[in-house]
Image: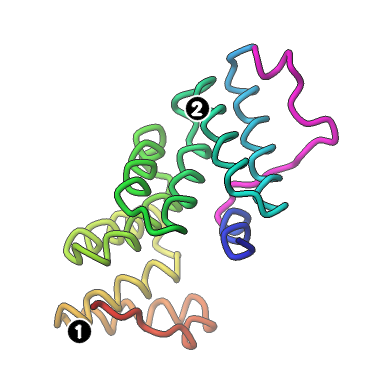
């Protein structure tokens, strides 16, 4: 679960927390701010190692704000973490419906798609890079997929761009594609 929590922080889905946690008044108000408070509480549950509590709290946030990008995104991460790919994609798509340029959801959707539809993964990574051309990890994943699909020149271009943007990417191993 530590890796999942790290992904949440790296992707910008965590934020400042308060010592108070959600109050009954805030949680019952139905406002986006109350939902955001619940998202923060869910992230604390993840930090404490309780994915089940986090999942329930993210769902509660969605009851207050059905378009809460971070609740959908984190539910996608939780589903992806346990191999529930269809649910992960559903949650990432819900996050993307609320914010079509949320690159973290797009990127993770691409990773999930790699297991069954490499062409769709290519499309998703290209969308990510259209939004954020400096995302080294997306260049690397796109490069690996293209290499597997036999598009060597394009693959090498993306792989070298990924390493140029972040030299640590040189150590990243290509995923296996079945």
Q: In front: mark 2 or mark 1?
A: 2
Q: Is residue 154 left or right of residue 99?
A: left
- Residue at the disc numbered 2: 62
Q: Secondary structure at mark 2?
A: helix
Which mark, by number, is residue 129? none
- Rendered residue at 76%/21% (across/down): 23
- Residue 39 is a magenta residue: no
- Residue 22 is a magenta residue: yes
Q: Position of residue 143 (x, y in %)?
A: 30, 77
Please tell me how crowded label 1 is: few (under 14), some (14-19), or many (20+) other residues with Cα within 10 Å: few
Asked whether the residues under the numbered discs 2 and 1 touch, taking CB atoms below 8 Å apart as contact, a structural biologist would say no
Q: Secondary structure at mark 1?
A: helix
Position of residue 136 relative to residue 18, above or below, is below
Colour mapping used in the image: rainbow
Mark 2–mark 1 distance (CA, rounded to whole Å): 44 Å
Q: Position of residue 136 (x, y in %)?
A: 45, 71
Q: Nearer the viewer, residue 174 or 140?
A: 174
Quadrant, the C terminus: bottom left
Please tell me how crowded label 2 is: few (under 14), some (14-19), or many (20+) other residues with Cα within 10 Å: many
Q: Nearer the viewer, residue 103 or 9?
A: 9
- Rendered residue at 64%/47% (across/down): 14
- Residue at the disc numbered 1: 153
Position of residue 109 relative to residue 67, above or below, is below
Q: Is residue 29 left or right of residue 68?
A: right
Sequence order check: which comes first, mark 2 or mark 1?
2
- Rendered residue at 62%/57% (across/down): 5
Predominant SS of the magenta segment: loop
Looking at the rendering, the stretch of residues picked out in magenta corresponds to 11-28
């Amino acid at each position: 679960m530590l890796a999942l929590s790290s992904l949440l922080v790296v992707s910008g889905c965590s934020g400042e927390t308060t010592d108070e946690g959600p109050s009954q008044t805030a949680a019952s108000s139905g406002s986006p701010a109350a939902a955001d408070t619940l998202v923060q509480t869910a992230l604390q549950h993840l930090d404490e190692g309780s994915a089940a509590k986090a999942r329930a709290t993210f769902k509660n946030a969605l009851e207050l704000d059905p378009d809460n990008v971070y609740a959908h995104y984190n539910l996608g991460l939780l589903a992806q973490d346990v191999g529930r790919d269809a649910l992960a994609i559903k949650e990432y798509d819900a996050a993307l419906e609320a914010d079509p340029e949320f690159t973290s959801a797009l990127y993770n959707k691409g990773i999930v798609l790699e297991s069954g539809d490499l062409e769709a993964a290519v499309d998703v990574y290209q969308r990510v890079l259209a939004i954020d051309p400096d995302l080294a990890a997306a260049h690397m994943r796109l490069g690996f997929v293209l290499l597997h699909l036999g598009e060597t020149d394009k693959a090498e271009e993306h792989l070298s761009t990924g390493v140029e943007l972040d030299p640590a990417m040189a150590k990243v191993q290509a995923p296996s594609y079945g």
